[in-house]
Image (cartoon, grey):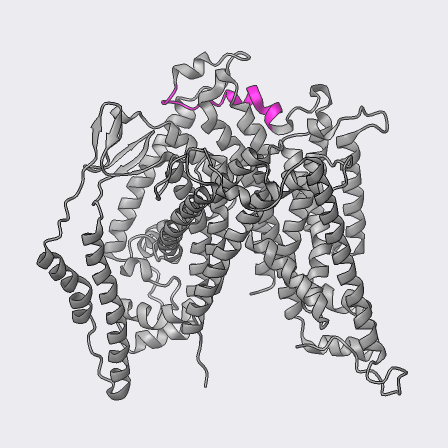
Amino acid sequence: MISDDPRPPPRRSFFGALGPNELKGLFWQVLVVGIAVAVVVFLWSNTVTNLSARRITTGFAFLGREAGMPIADSLLAYNPRDSYLWAFVVGVANTLRVAVIGIVLATILGTLIGISRLSANWLLARLAAVYVEVLRDIPLLLQLLFWYVLMQALPAARAAWRPVEGVFLSNRGLILPAVPVGSPQLWVLGTAVTGFAVFYLVQRWLISRQMQDGRPRPAWPFALGLIVVLPAAVSLLFGVSWTIEWPALRGFNFIGGLALSPEYFALLIALVTYTAAFIAEIVRSGIQSVPRGQWDAASALGLRRSFMLRQIILPQALRVIVPPMTSQYLNLTKNSSLAVAIGYQDVVSIANTTLNQTGQAIEAIALIMAVFLTISLGISFFMNWFNARIALSER
Amino acid sequence: MSAITEMPDLPRAARRPQIGNPVLRWLRSNLFSSIPNGILTVVLLAVLAKGVIGFVQWGIVNAVWLTPANDSNACKAVRGLGACWAIIPEKYRFILFGTFPFNQQWRPGLSVLLFIALFYLSTRRALWRRELAYLWIGALAMISVLMWGGVLGLSFVSQDRWGGLPVTLILATFGLAFGFPLGILVALGRRSKLPAIRSLSVLYVELIRGVPLVSLLFMASVMFPLFMPSGFNIDKLLRAQIAIILFAGAYLAEVIRGGLQAVPRGQYEAADALGLSYWRKQRLVVLPQAIRHVIPPLVNTFIAFFKDTSLVLIIGIFDLLTTAKTAIIDPAWQQFSVEVYIFVAAIYFVFCFAMSRYSRSLEAMRGR
């Protein structure tokens, strides 16, 4: 910490331990806190007066009332007779659905574009640079409206595009073949997740053994066994069926398969392509921050390129990449609130409808803020933990 | 994979003698350095050619550039095959200036030029002196006079008639002009030794940065009337402006704080040794150095909330994006929204691209 205070010349003060500087500090703090409290009290009293004048009851009691709003696109079971509280939960699920998938896809796309910018192939590097520059310099909302217009301009369901068998793209959105998931399938997936966790521990043990005698031990047989073979065995043992459900056109609409609404799809594309441009720059500067000598030394050891990237360059680049990446993930999550502009019902859009129906403005906006602050804290917490894991451990 | 992961400009220990045609040499080293690289080049060229030819077909060859006023039949004839650029001459006055009285539209036009001149002068290193602040105050005052009128023989135009590009520029520029001093105060507050001031600053910054701008704008449009004593009403545009100032202040504060951390400790100690008071020390010694450090990220932050001003569409304020979206409501032109979006995107792009170029040139000047 930098001391912002000149050392006062030693002199006997009137106030004992409270020197003139402490007094000055105390005065400033009392002043600023006083102003802040006064502003809050002023706003609060006005609000109370206005609310009573408009006969609006405050409080969250309205959350128990019947919402009566339709929600077109939801992960969870919902009908308009459910409560506002449940509508909010559905909204949060919709926000998370777009944010989580968006973060994963944007990371993949952004990393690819970031590496492309460093490619030895001049054409690829130029194209990646143009992509980044164009996407970064146009407002996200404009891009979102643009994608949404394009989605609406797609042919009707009967004339849908079929890029691959079983995939339909039309103005009804994107329809994909899906595997119906019930509890037996979930058990198998659970086995795979458990296998992955066990594999993580095994890998740590293998590395610690390698640290002792310097001999690398291959980890892939364990990975194959725990993450692929074991769940497959469980699946066969209990005869879990994995029939793929192919969507089909009946009349004017599709049945079966997994349907992504045009609103969701437009929002996802806009968020992913936009955020990927920023992630690409982060990845590029991260890789460029690794000193030249590291590349040279790894080449001098005669290491293979892929090994070199994975074991030497990326771990060092990650230290530079992770902190700014965190703020991009937060941005993507916050930007998902633009859904309200095209009518995808995320938490902001549902809060907005609630606000218009009930007049409970303060509560609705407070709920939006609480939801986003919670998500932000969650992402920050996870990324800080990850960052601490990869940070330089100095003796 | 090797085509992708090769590092550029590897130091060539022994330069091969430069033989042959320089063009061919460049092609070999930059596009066909290895077999996978060559394949990649060919594939990319094919994709690029397909895209460019398709766009030229749609955007230039089959496009309709002009139609008689208010007649979109020629456009409807080529729908799907060619672009309808005719919508731009038809609607550009509305897109750029909204519902500002038609014969007075030279005023917002001049305001836009003033904004551009202001930004340009702000990028000149020679002008980074105290006078720049006066320049800003003068320019913003002139723009207010031009937009509002009511003095100097200009007719009065109320804010709800403003629209388009000037509104976007006003929201962003006033956001910067007021957010910047606020950001400085909050950044100093966050680094202060006084616990109450520090925690208030931290609370403000984290609260604003943790929620989407949309929710702040909702607050401005819905809750603000509740906050104020009855009978006291502020115009919608100004309410959104306040939200954007508060939003910008938090982000700028974080950038400035980074700059404060980069000022070496000796500078503080030297200022203390001269016996400067806290405010004089910050004003004369610390802040000038801190801000000089972070001008590139400051420009980037400005670009970010220049783009973010478009969010006021959601609360129904007529900025550039809202006027564009409104222009397409006209039934005759409804199907040609893509063309309008491309036009508006180009305007945003020109502004942001110029600023990001400038930010990059500053970084290059610092010699990285």
Left or right of A224? Residue B78 is right
Residue A268 pos. (x, y %): 39, 43
Q: Nearer the viewer, residue B140 or A24?
A: A24
- Tell how many labels: 0
Is residue B205 rendered to the left or right of residue B235?
Answer: left
In the image, residue A373 sits, relative to residue B268, either above or below, namely: above
Residue A89 higher or lower than A153, as above or below = below
Quadrant where the C terminus of chain A lies?
Answer: bottom left
Q: Magenta stretch: residue A316 in it? A: no
Residue A84: image location, x then y, percent:
47, 41
Front residue of this view, candidates B85 and A54: A54
In magenta stretch: residue B86 = yes
Please provide percent x and percent y for residue A181: 22, 48
If the image is split into quadrants, where does the N terminus of chain A sit? bottom right
In the rendered image, is residue A140 in sight? no
Q: In the image shown, does A31 or B73 lie closer to the viewer?
A: A31
The outermost residue toward the right is: A14
For image coordinates 50% across by 12% down, the residue present is B71
Judged left or right of residue A347, residue B147 is right
Instruction: Using residue B89 as the reference point, say whether residue B72 is left or right of it.
Output: left
Foreground residue, A295 or B303? B303
Which residues are drawn in magenta?
B79-95
- Residue A100 visible in the shown view: yes
Q: How far across and how far down the image is residue B274, in percent?
A: 83, 77
The residue at the point 80 percent across, 40 percent down is B141
